[in-house]
């Protein structure tokens, strides 16, 4: 779950009185960014060549020294065939053929994704993994210990898996006469530069690494006749035949829906759900209806879409006064608000929100203060109690790629909340510190930092505190794949006959502010 956005003049506060008041622990690579770019608008496009991948530049220091947990290693060596055998053995209502078809699905638009999941239970003790959101162009590589110490390209970890299993297949569709290769990003330079270095090694040619921020007035990236161009430090523009996109903030206002340059992921995957929580919810509902006979479904908190500001109190009241409010198009920890009392609701209602419509979602809290929904109450399993008997809310990020060979898991990490979960909720409690797990923090100057002190690695030291078994990981993987397929199918519907279906999109997601942003990069639709 993400964190509420800071206002321009707000100080960065990571912790409250109950815990030590310290700023987020940020690795040097995050602060340095490209090492040539002290401010988002002052950097230069960098040319990355073969042999430039240095692990210490692309992994957190504690990850480099971490030993992968044996259970995690076992999960990654299972393969889809054994995952199908295990899952259908424990869930006999699911036919192996149906699950094989799902895991063998080849995405058309959405090849690289990561889902955030909660491990929850019900009052009767039924545990399951539920999908909170699914992200296009997800982070995660810098937080994943290496799976093997013997593979030839071991030091490149999951970076190489993403490039080889997903992007290389897209690259083969590119017209070599158009130009070169590029990685375009707007945050997380530690991982973006890692992908650029690995792509240079795999493609055996140099790769341009360029930043393109929402607020850039003179970016080093432009579109000419639907071909991407990047500008080098000598102010020379270079056409690009294939682009690895790590653009996360309103990417639809800079990348067009139809391009001659091959882009992964395509922008339609973000609009169809990868960076649009409203459409993701619709996609899940449609896909669940399609697979209702298989015994499988995407499990999520109860979600109400297209809610106007005035309707919010009514929907919260129907959920017992507890809920989660989301700005549908925010990400990286912004635009999510937990509501359990009047103060939290008043704070949300008093803010100026750019978009017209919101999402209301049932709150997953503790057993005594979760939202009441039609399917009962979900509450957090949380971490194993620490020495003070405190349990913390935690989540799991599962990154996957999809190609002609089907899906495969790439990397996993966990995060925990700042404050422990309480049994009784105080009337004036600020619940975000108990329920919010996102590590990204937006600074007043528009930059980003990361609170790595709450990161849970999949190593021998950290993993056990999550209390997860291999069947939980298999459940998380299958839920992630189902969510990605749902969004890819929605993207395919929206791009029927190769043209963006403006009327269908607007009927599913009526929001004038969003449509204006899409038009910024798509003047002809």
Image (spheres, rainbow, N blue to C red):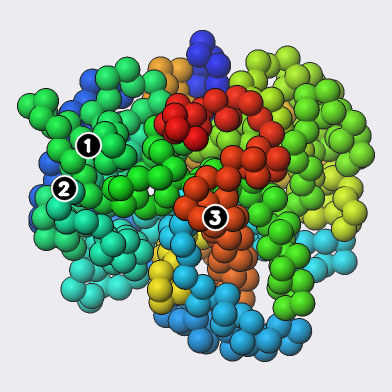
Label 3 sits on residue: 496
Quadrant hosting residue 425: top right
Which comes before the other along the chain, label 2 or label 3? Answer: 2
Q: Residue at left 56%, top 34%? A: 330
For residue 493, side relative to residue 195 (left or right):
right
Q: Residue at left 54%, top 25%? A: 516
Q: Nearer the viewer, mark 3 or mark 1?
A: 3
Give the crowd class for mark 1: few <14, some 14-19, many >=20 residues within 10 Å: many
Label 2 sits on residue: 179
> Marks 2 and 1: in contact by CB < 8 Å?
yes
Q: Which of marks 2 and 3 is in front?
A: 3
Q: Residue at left 85%, top 54%? A: 377
Name the one closer to the observer, 211 or 417: 211
Task: Provide residue 217's location: percent of width, then percent of height.
Answer: 32, 17
Label 1 sits on residue: 229
Give the crowd class for mark 3: few <14, some 14-19, many >=20 residues within 10 Å: few
Task: Provide residue 184's location: percent of width, then percent of height.
Answer: 30, 40
Report, in whole angstroms, how far the alpha carbon at label 3 lies from the one at label 1.
27 Å
């Amino acid at each position: 779950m993400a964190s509420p956005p800071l206002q321009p003049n707000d100080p960065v506060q990571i912790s409250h009185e109950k815990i030590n008041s310290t700023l987020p622990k940020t690795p040097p690579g995050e602060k340095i960014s490209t090492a040539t770019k002290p401010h988002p608008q002052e950097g230069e496009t960098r040319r990355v060549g073969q042999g430039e991948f240095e692990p210490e530049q692309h992994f957190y220091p504690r990850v480099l020294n971490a030993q992968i947990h044996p259970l995690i290693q076992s999960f990654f060596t299972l393969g889809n065939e054994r995952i199908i055998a295990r899952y259908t053995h424990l869930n006999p209502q699911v036919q192996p053929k149906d699950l094989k078809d799902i895991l063998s699905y080849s995405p058309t638009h959405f090849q690289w994704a990561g889902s955030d999941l909660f491990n929850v239970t019900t009052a009767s003790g039924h545990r399951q993994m539920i999908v909170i959101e699914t992200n296009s162009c997800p982070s995660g590589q810098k937080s994943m210990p290496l799976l093997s110490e013997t593979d030839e390209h071991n030091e490149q970890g999951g970076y190489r898996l993403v490039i080889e299993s997903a992007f290389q297949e897209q690259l083969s569709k590119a017209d070599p006469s158009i130009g070169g290769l590029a990685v375009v990003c707007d945050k997380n330079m530690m991982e973006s530069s890692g992908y650029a270095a690995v792509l240079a090694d795999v493609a055996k040619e140099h790769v341009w690494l360029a930043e393109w921020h929402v607020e850039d007035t003179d970016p080093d990236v432009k579109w000419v006749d639907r071909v991407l161009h990047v500008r080098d430090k000598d102010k020379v523009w270079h056409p690009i035949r294939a682009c690895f996109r790590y653009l996360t903030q309103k990417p639809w206002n800079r990348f067009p829906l139809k391009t001659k340059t091959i882009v992964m992921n395509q922008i339609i995957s973000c609009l169809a759900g990868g960076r649009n929580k409203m459409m993701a919810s619709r996609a899940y509902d449609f896909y669940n209806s399609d697979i209702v006979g298989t015994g499988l479904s995407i499990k999520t908190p109860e979600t109400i879409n297209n809610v106007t500001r005035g309707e919010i109190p009514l929907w919260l009241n129907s959920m017992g006064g507890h809920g989660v409010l989301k700005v549908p198009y925010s990400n990286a920890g912004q635009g999510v608000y937990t509501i359990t009392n009047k103060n939290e609701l008043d704070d949300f209602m008093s803010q100026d929100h750019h978009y017209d419509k919101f999402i209301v979602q049932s709150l997953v809290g503790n057993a005594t203060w979760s939202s009441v929904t039609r399917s009962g109450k979900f509450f957090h399993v949380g971490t194993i109690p620490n020495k003070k008997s405190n349990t913390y809310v935690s989540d799991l990020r599962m990154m996957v790629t999809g190609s002609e060979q089907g899906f495969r898991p790439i990397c996993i990490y966990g995060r925990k909340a700042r404050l422990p979960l309480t049994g009784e909720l105080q009337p004036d409690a600020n619940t975000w510190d108990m329920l919010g797990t996102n590590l990204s923090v937006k600074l007043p100057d528009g930059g980003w930092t990361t609170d790595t002190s709450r990161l849970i690695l999949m190593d021998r030291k950290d993993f056990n505190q999550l209390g997860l078994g291999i069947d939980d990981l298999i459940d998380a993987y299958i839920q992630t794949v189902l969510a990605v397929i749902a969004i890819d199918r929605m993207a395919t519907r929206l791009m029927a006959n190769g043209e963006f279906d403006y009327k269908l999109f607007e009927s599913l997601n009526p929001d004038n502010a969003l449509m204006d942003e899409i038009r910024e990069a798509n003047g002809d639709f």
